[in-house]
Amino acid sequence: MLLIPFLIGIVFILIHFFASVLVPRDKLKQVKWFSFSGGLAVSYIFIYLLPTLHKQQAAIQEPYRQLTMESEIYFVGLLGVVLFVGIQIVIQQNYISHTSTFWSVIVFYAFYNALVSYSVLSFEVSAVQALFYCVAIGPHFMAVAHDMWRKFPVEYNKYGRYILAVGIVAGWIVALTTELTPLFKSIVFSLVSGAMIYTVFKHELPSEKDTHFPTFLISVIIYSAITITLKFVFEW
């Protein structure tokens, strides 16, 4: 059903367009928002993302199964973390100007958006799963976009949000027009998962002094309970 992936893509694009205004300006409200978003993201990683990696590892078929040691998919996820950390360090250590740094970061995250978009939209999902993805990944995109807007406000509003939106569209087009092998899909999903884990803990998990713990805890409890219930009912 093409309508659901299309709607997911539209939501993701709108988040990037309006990231600068969707996050509250009031300091206390902003702390609560990021605490809630961080709770969603952490819950998504431990309740859905990591178990899905396990399923991807178990789903490797012949003849590749003879070569596996029950850890390759996790290793690819580790490579995703290393790759993203390495690229961030290269960008920071090769600083030339504010503008060049912006373009390096924005192109990097446009590629990241394309990979995330592909990973989400390449699998046929029900309406319930579509809502689940939007609730989990939407705030993740918003937190990353808001962080870039905060660092590069003029450049982000003028160019950045459109380039990030193009990344979403690119991943969406590839997902809907290209049929890749299950193994390659698993590799892409694992690589993105590692990158997402790094990005969540870097951008979304607030520091102790900037965390409203009750909001964070409520977010973790509610999202975890809903996710576990949905996985039980729909056998995800």
Image (tube, rainbow, N blue to C red):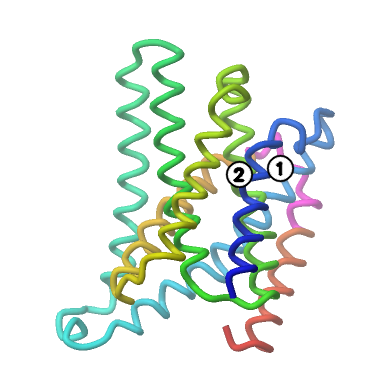
Query: In the image, 164: left or right of 81?
Result: right
x and y percentages locating residue 145 in the rendered image: 59, 36
Secondary structure under tag 1 reads helix
Look at the picture and state if 162 lies above or below 55. above
- Residue at numbered disc 1: 34
Query: In the image, 114: left or right of 3?
Result: left
Give the residue type that dot 1 points to: Phe
Which numbered disc flags the more N-terminal residue, 2 or 1?
Answer: 1
Secondary structure under tag 2 reads helix
Look at the picture and state if 134 lies above or below 122. above
Tell me the crowding category of disc 2: few under 14, some 14 to 19, or many 20 or more residues within 10 angstroms, Cα based: many
Q: Specify the quadrant of the image occupied by residue 212.
A: top right
Residue at point 40%, 10% (across, down): 97
Tell me the crowding category of disc 1: few under 14, some 14 to 19, or many 20 or more residues within 10 angstroms, Cα based: many
Residue at point 73%, 74% (across, down): 225
Give the residue type that dot 2 points to: Glu
x and y percentages locating residue 104 in the rendered image: 38, 27
Query: In the image, 176: left or right of 205?
Result: left
Residue 190: image tag: none
- Residue at numbered disc 2: 204
Query: In the image, 163: left or right of 153?
Result: left
x and y percentages locating residue 95 in the rendered image: 35, 16
Find the residue positioned furthest to the top.
97
Residue at point 68%, 55% (across, down): 39
Q: Main secondary structure of the magenta part?
A: helix
Q: Nearer the viewer, residue 173 or 93?
A: 173
Q: Specify the quadrant of the image occupied by residue 16.
A: top right
Dots 2 and 1: beta carbons under 8 Å? yes
Which residues are drawn in magenta? 207-217
Q: Separation of disc 2 and disc 1 at Cα?
A: 7 Å
Specify the quadrant that holds the N terminus.
Answer: bottom right
